[in-house]
Amino acid sequence: MKLGRICLTLVAFLAALPTAAATLAERSPFAQGLWWNAQRSGHGFEIFNAGTETMVLWYTYDTAGAPVWYSAQGTFGAASWPLRKHRWTNGRLGATEVVGTLGLKVNTPESAEVSFTVGGQAGTWKIEPFRLSGITNEVDHSGVYFNPDSSGWGLSLTHQGDILGGVLYSYDANGAPTWYAGFDRGSTGTVNFYATRGACPTCAAQATTTTPAGRVTFDRNGESELYLRNQISGTFAAGASPDGAWMTQLGRRVSSRPADRQLANFASNASLKAFLDAAMLNVSSNSTGADFSAAPPAASFSSTNLQEAGVDEADVVKTDGNRIYTFTYESNIRKPELRIAQVANDGAQIAIAGTVPLMPSGSGASNVYNSMINAGLYTLPQRLVSLTGPGPSGYYPDGPWAISGAWTGGATSIEIFDTSGSGLPASTWHAKVDGYMVSSRRIGERLYVVARYVPKIPGFVYGTSYPPGVEGNRALLAATPLAQLLPNVSINGGANVPLVDAASIFVPPQGDRVIPADMVVIYAIDLTNKRIAQSLAILGSAEAIYASTDNLYVASSRFTYRTWYGALLPPLTYSTTELHQIRLGAETMTLVGSGSVEGTLGTNMDKAAFRMSESAGRLRVVTSDTMMWGGGALKNRLTILEPSTIAQGTLKTVSYLPNPQRPEAIGKPGELLYGTRFVGDRLYAVTFKLIDPLYVIDLANAADPKIAGALELPGFSEYLHPLPNGLLLGFGKDAKPAIAQGDGSFAWYQGLQLSLFDVSNAGVPREIQRTLIGKRGSDSALLREHHAFASLPRDDGSLAIAIPARIHDGSNSGGGDSTMYPWLESGLLRFEVRGTTPADAKLVQLPTLVTHAPSNSPYLGPSPDAGSSMGRSVIFKQGTVYVGNGKFWKIDSTGNAVGPL
C-alpha cells in the first residue's frame, strides 16, 4: 500500500470516529507523537493511532550515515508490520520498497520496545516519548501534518509548553527520502532546523552530527491546519518542496483526545474491576495563600494558625475560648482519649475538666502508638470534631509516599461531639471510614477529608513476583467482588456501605507508571446533618493537598523528561508535578481540570501546601528541580495556571518565572527553597545556601509576574508570617558558612532567629530587627508545623506571639561552628510586636515559659520534646496556655507560671 493511500485511508477512518469522551476506554493505548531511545540520540519515531490502526514514521540513517525515513502501519498488537521505504518520482509518490519489518510492544503508555529488521539485520530498542516540557498546552498543535494535494511527505510537529519544532520529512533532489529536525524555545512560529548524519540502526552507536540547515515557519490556522514556509538550504524533489504548502493533521488532534491528558472515569463496574484486578498485582509489600488576616481586635483568644483565612485545619490542640481540647498521652504515647482544660477570666485561671474516650478507628493497627499517628480536632459553635487513625505501616527512610503497600488496611475514625452543656463533650455521631487520612479541611459546615486507600484482601500476597504466588493472587482477585476492592464507611456502628461508586472514580494519564490500586479518596461530611454528603476518588498517589474556600487541589509527581535545547537532545532526567482542581460546593464536588507544572513541590510534603495559593480563580505554584531548566543545579520556578475556556478540563499555564523576558532566578543556583508565603498579589520566598535571600515577587499582573525586590541576610527563614501594614515575620535559624561541609554541605546551622521585615515597598525590602535565641542545637516545632505559631492582637495595638522551642546554649568547649551546645531548657518563647507600622514596629522578647530544665528533666531533656515537635499554645488576654504531650502550663502577664496540669 502506498503512503498516499495510507493517508487517505486514515483520514476516512478518522472522520468516522465519534467525539471523544473522558472515559478510560477512550484513552490512547500509548502517548501520541515523537518517541526516542536516549542511548541512540538522533533517531526518532512518530507513533500515532486511530482505533486499532497504528502508524509509525521512523527517522533514522542509512549505512552511509545519511538521513532516511521509513513507514510502518498495521493493527495495534500485531507481532510486526512491513517496514517501507518510499521514493518520489516525476513529481509524485513513486515506488514503495519493503525493506524489513517493525514491531511495537507497548509496556505502558510511555514505555515501549521496537523490534526491527532492516537490510537483513535485526535489532530491538527500548523507547519512550520525546518530552521537552512539563507544561500542558491550552491549544496543542502537535501531530503529523500532510498536504492532501501532494501526499507522501509531511511534518511531525511537536508543541510542548513554549517549545515548538519537529521533523520535516520529504525527498531530496534525487527522490530519496530525507529529513531535517529542529526545536526552539519561545518560538511563535519560526524554528531553526538542522541537517543530521548518524549511525544506521544496526550499526555501532556513535554521536550524531548536526549542521544548521535554515529555518521553517509555521503559520497555524486553528488547531489542525498550518501553512508552511520553507527556508531550508537543502534541495527537495520537484513537487515535494514544503514551501508554500497548506497542511492538515493526519492523526487525531489533541482536543479530540481529552482522556489522554485529563482525569477519566470508568464506563462500567466491569471496567473498574478489570483495572483494579491488574493494579493489585503492582502493589508492593509493606514490610520493611490568600492574604493573611489577623484575628479581629475583639478576639479574646488566639485560634489555630491557618494558611488560608476561612479554611480551617485540624490540629492536636483546639479551643473554643472556654475550653482547650487535646489528646491524652500515657508513657509518651498518644491515646484515643480527649483531655480537656477549662479556662476562665480571659485565661487568668485554668483547671483540668476531665477526659473523654474516643471511638476506635477499627484499623487493626498493631499498637496504640500507631493507631493515633494521625489525629486532629476541629471546634465549631457548640461542637467538637475529632479525626484519628493510624499512619502508613512499615518503615521507609524516604517516607511512605511512593510505597503502595504501606497504605493497605488503614481506617479513619471521625466523631462529632456536643459541647453545648456545662459537662464534658458528648458523642453524637461516629463514622469509621476505610483509608489512611492524608489531610483535611473545614469550610463552614463542610468537613473535607482526603484519604489514601489500597485494598486489603485476606490471603493476598502483596509484592510477590514468585509465579505460583502471582497465579494465586490472580485466582483470589477473580473471586473477589468489586465491592471488596472499594473503600467502605460504617456510621454509628452500622453495616459497611460503599464510600464511593465506580462513576465517581477517576484515573489520570499514567505515563510510564504502573497502573495503581491506590485511591486518593476525597469525601465531604455535612456537619449540620451529620452525614457523608459527597465523595470522589482519584486513582494514584497524592503528595500534597491545598484548599482555598472554593477549590481543593491534589498534587502528585509524574514523568521523567528530557532537556529541550539543541537539535538532537542528550538524556537528562527531571520531573513535573500533576495538578487536579476540584470545585467544592454545598451540592456537589466537581472536577474542574487537570494540568502540570515543571519541577516538584519539594521533599517535605507537610510544607508543600505553602507552595500553592489561589487568587482570582488562578492557582500559583512554586516548584524546584535540579535538571529541568538546565545547568545541573537546584533552581526554582513560579507557575500561574487557570482553567481553560477553550480546552475544557485543562488547567492552562498563564505565565511562569523566570522566563526569557524576566530571566532573574528565584534564588542563586543550588540554593534550597525554604519559607514561601503568598499574600494577596505577592509571593515572599526565602532561599538559602550561605546567606538568606528574601525575595518579594509581584503577582499583580498574572500574565507577567516579576521579582520586585530581594534582601540578603545571614541564616534562613523556614516560616513566614505576614502582618498588616507591610510587615512580615520570618522564623528560622542563624547559620555560619562552612569552609568544607555543613548541614547540607553549605553552612552550619546555629541558634533560632526571629526577624521582623519591612516589605511595604516591594522593591526595597529591609530587615527592621533580628532576634537570636539559643545556639547550635536549638530547635522549634515551628520549623516543622505552622500550627505551632500563635498570635493575638492586644487592645493597645501590640501583637502577642508564642513559639515552642528547645534551647541549647552555654559552652561548646571551643569546638567551633560545627559543635553542638548543651541543652539548656524547653518551653514557650514569647514576644510582642510593638508598633503597627514599619516606622515604629519593634520586637520585644518576654520571659520564656520554661517547662523543662536540667533541674527537673533528664540530662538531654524530655523525649519527646514538645518544644521541637507538636507543641502548641493559646494566647488569652490575661495569660498564655502551653500544651505539650497532653499536659498544660500557663503563664500570666507578670511571668508567673503554673503547670504541668
Image (cartoon, helix red, strand yellow):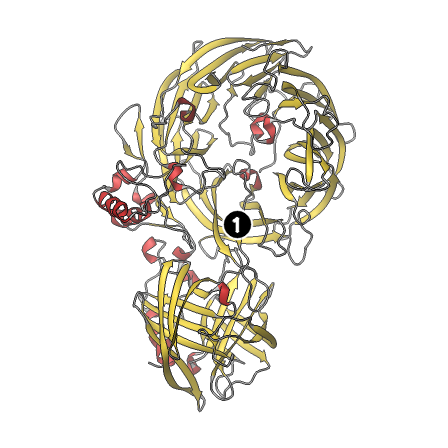
Residue 697: in sight, yes or no? yes
Question: Foreground residue, 166 or 194?
Answer: 194
Residue 728: in sight, yes or no? no
| Image position, residue 804 (x, y; %) | 61, 22
Q: Residue at x 32, y 39 (%)?
A: 455
Q: Residue at x 23, y 41 (%)?
A: 480
Q: Is residue 453 above or below residue 573?
A: above
| Image position, residue 273 (x, y; %) | 27, 46
Q: Residue at x 51, y 12 (%)?
A: 341
Q: Amino acid at mark 1?
A: Glu
Report the residue that reaches farthest toward the right.
Answer: 839
Q: Quadrant of residue 91?
A: bottom left
Locate the C terminus by quadrant: top right
Question: Foreground residue, 813 or 146?
Answer: 813
| Image position, residue 139 (x, y; %) | 49, 61
Circle 1: element type: strand
- Give the residue number, with chain letter if any, for mark 1: 642
Question: Foreground residue, 291 or 707?
Answer: 707
